[in-house]
Image (tube, rainbow, N blue to C red):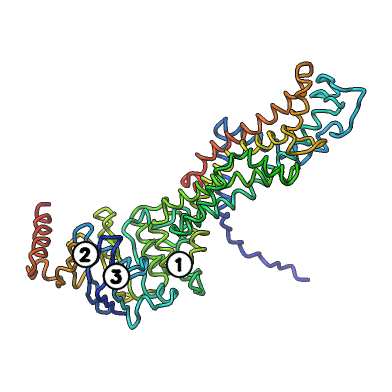
Amino acid sequence: MKPIIIDRLSISFGPIRVLHDVSFDVTAGECFGLVGESGSGKSTILRCASMLTDIWDGTVRIGEHDVRKMPVAERCRTVQMVFQDPYGSLHPRHSIRTALDEGLRINGFDDREARLAQAMRDVGLPVEFLDRYPHQLSGGQRQRVAIARALILEPDVLFLDEPTSALDVSVQAEVLNLLVRLQQEKGFTYLMVSHDLAVVDHMCDRFAIMQHGRIVEVLDRDAITGGGATQPYAKQLIDASLEYERAI
Amino acid sequence: MSMTRDIPAPVPRRRMPQSLIAARNIVAFLTRSPTSLFGLVVLALLILVALFAPLIATHDPYAQNLQATLQPPSGTHFFGTDELGRDIFSRLVHGSRITLTIISLVTVVVGPLGLFFGTVAGYFGGKVDTVLMRITDIFLSFPSLILSLAFVAALGPSLNNAIIAIALTAWPPIARLARAETLTFRQADYIAAARLQGASSARIIWKSIVPMCLPSVTIRLTLNMATVILTAAGLGFLGLGAQPPLPEWGAMIATGRRYMIDSWWLVTFPGIAILCVSLAFNLLGDGLRDALDPKQMNKR
């Protein structure tokens, strides 16, 4: 279990400033949500903190260490990410075995066969699926494979980039429950991006509302139903979301 | 002596290697359409003929017989004889070896070279991309026959120089293609996932990007083969490729040209051979385009 500390993270793509001095802390073992409209910079935070993008300023610390100064191998075994679109996050020509095994090989894990089987069991997939290809799986199964790929390196922190938004509602619940169970079993720290407050309400202990690359407000889960938001934009977003829930 | 025998432990059923399954599926798919089947058959025939050339040929391809020059096709000389009395059928059969050598050497050079330039340029982008693509542009700006001519003129006419010259001009389109393909998925999430797993750039290019580029590059290479054969034949025809007495098909047409009016068989049969093989490669390339669909490849 490791905490995440993000301090004055900012990034510009050309002349456009995408993140403006974003700072927040995630305590160890917590699930922290990032909510906001499209283009508010939620996913960018994850891509910066996982060093997929490295042109940012500020500091991101996971546990004791600055992610910038971590050796690649250590970073891989600390942070993993689950992507939004399970159709795009698995290599179409790699079998599930290859997809999962890659990380083990690169990081020099031993006893790989047992780890592969364990990872499949962890995400509730039959071990025989190892020899399948992504196009032979459904969306929910693919997302389970993507989760297996993330947890097979035994990370402490999982970044979830809208892990359920590309899935059917019934499958969404399955995947969310799986994520909750994995957190209880393995004590992950989650940093989750979502635009669905219902998902955040189900998963997260605290969440931050973002707008135009800034954090508007950091709230507890109770603030969704209890009306604890103080900032006008946060109120508006929560009200709109509740309104929408009632409408359906 | 004891009668008990060790009962062999049941052998775990081996999984068939994925590449074998894929290859089987591709061939099965190709045989289903008549055009690509034609390509496949002609190509198989070419390889068989080249392998067993001495057995198939009825005469020595180099043996001259000045008493039997310019004989029309008959029972002893299936495709007739040329101006020196050499058996055209035997020369065609032996010529298939030369054609196959040209094709395979060019493929071996062009495929990896084009893939390397294209994927590296596409994956890294920026300065690397600029430098590699400008090099590609330089090679691309030469008309292939002219560059081959210049090259052969500088190094002297021979088959090997012709092959090098053709290879030098054939890789840039492959590199362009591989780069374009790489650009479309270098931002894909599975590449990001590979980077998060700690894969080095070389590993990502080799394991994730090359397999994605391979089908289109294979198709392009196959379609290119027709051009390669024609260029080689053209160089042979101009006297810059294979040198006499090598039975190269283009060179055979070149020498037969002088007797074309009276002895049609001198140019017709090598011409048909070139036509068949280039057509076969074109049709095969076309068929491969459908067969290399990933869903098609991995079906069991």
Q: Specify which label sits upstream in the sequence, 2 or 3.
A: 3
Is residue A1 visible from the viewing direction of this image?
no
Badge 1 and badge 2 both on one subunit: yes
SS of the residue under disc 1: helix
Residue marked by disc 3: A181
Eyeballing the image, is B38 above or below A21? above
How far apart, in angstroms, are the residues tagged by discs 2 and 3?
Answer: 32 Å
Q: Quadrant of residue B272?
A: top right
Camera-nearest label, 1 or 2: 2
Q: Position of residue A173 (x, y in %)?
A: 25, 60
* Amino acid type for the residue under numbered disc 2: Gly
| Chain where mark 3 sits | A
| Residue A213 image label | 2
| A186, above or below B77, in the image | below
Q: Secondary structure at mark 2?
A: loop
Task: Give the image location of residue B105, x and y in percent.
Answer: 68, 47
Q: CA distance from mark 1 to mark 3?
A: 18 Å
Name the N-terminal-most of marks 1 and 2: 1
Q: Earlier in the sequence, mark 1 or mark 3?
A: 1
Residue density around tag 2, few if under 14, some if 14–19, many if 20 or more, within 10 Å? many
Q: Residue type at mark 3? A: Arg
List the single residue furthest toward the right: B67
Chain name for mark 2: A
The tally of labels here is 3
Q: Say which mark, if any, is on residue B96.
A: none
Q: Residue at 75% across / 24% down in the picture? A: B257
Residue marked by disc 1: A117
Give the x, y percent position of residue B248.
75, 35
The residue closer to the viewer here, B156 or A141, is: B156
Mark in the foreground, 2 or 3: 2
